[in-house]
Image (cartoon, rainbow, N blue to C red):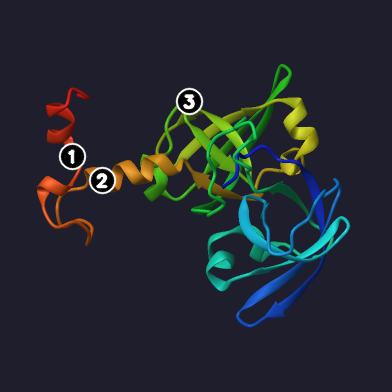
Amino acid sequence: MFTGIVAGKGKITAKRTVGGGVGLDITSEVELPDPEEGESIAINGVCLTAYNIRGRSFSADVSPETLSRSVLRFLGPGDRVNLERALRLSDRLGGHLVSGHVDCVALVTGKKPMGDYTLFSFSFPHQYDRYIIEKGSITINGVSLTVNSVNNGHFEVSIIPHTLMVTTLGELKIGSKVNIEVDIIGKYVEKMLAPKGHYEQGTGEEDRINQAFLAQHGFM
């Protein structure tokens, strides 16, 4: 798990074919203290397994499924990425719970200054609209952000100067593609409240949390 609080930026130094996926060599701009071979590192919000760690450099393989879901398929040597190491149980949870499993790719449709902030607009696949709510959390290229507004496949976020400086979000332009991970809690709640038979899980209505259960126990 991650928090969406990016530790720093890195640069892809090599990209090679590995089976049906790709292998990336990455050099971090920040130290990687106490590295562990096989640890999880989020690269632009994608949880990958780091190996061959050498000081600030490491390698990671990207599966075909991950390539199909994320912007990593478009990146190559020289491109910069956001990096975050996995959360320790003793760490501060400064952003929100992020799994590192990207849901979809969104497109930057607007970028304009708003005082000290920069307002970004994005378009995304309509099927994820129900998971994005005003003032809720969203992860963009691995960065935890708060949604300003959302409507019919579009949402906006305001980003402070510090975030633009320490992450690659400041390099985004209209037309740029980004990784999106919606708040994982919404997906679990949706599945638990889905009508019987909508998912192939569960053995009976009494085994599920649904609207009747919530009302009976004073949650509605």
Secondary structure beneath dot 1 equals: loop
Q: What x and y, as percent, mark residue 13?
A: 85, 64
Crowding at dot 1, Cα within 10 Å, few <14 / some 14-19 / many 20+, comes out as: some
Q: Are marks 1 and 3 in contact (CB under 8 Å)?
A: no
Q: Residue at x 80, y 34 (%)?
A: 165
Q: What x and y, as percent, mark residue 111?
A: 66, 34
Circle 3: residue type: Lys
Q: Residue at x 58, y 59 (%)?
A: 70
Secondary structure beneath dot 2 equals: helix
Distance CA(mark 2)–CA(mark 1): 7 Å
Distance CA(mark 2)–CA(mark 3): 23 Å
- Front position among marks 1 and 3: 1
Q: Are marks 2 and 1 in contact (CB under 8 Å)?
A: yes
Tag 2 residue: 192
Q: Is residue 98 above or below residue 201?
A: above
Q: Which mark is residue 210?
A: 1
Query: How many marks overall?
Result: 3
Q: Is residue 24 above or below residue 149?
A: below
Tag 3 residue: 135
Circle 2: residue type: Met
Crowding at dot 3, Cα within 10 Å, few <14 / some 14-19 / many 20+, comes out as: few
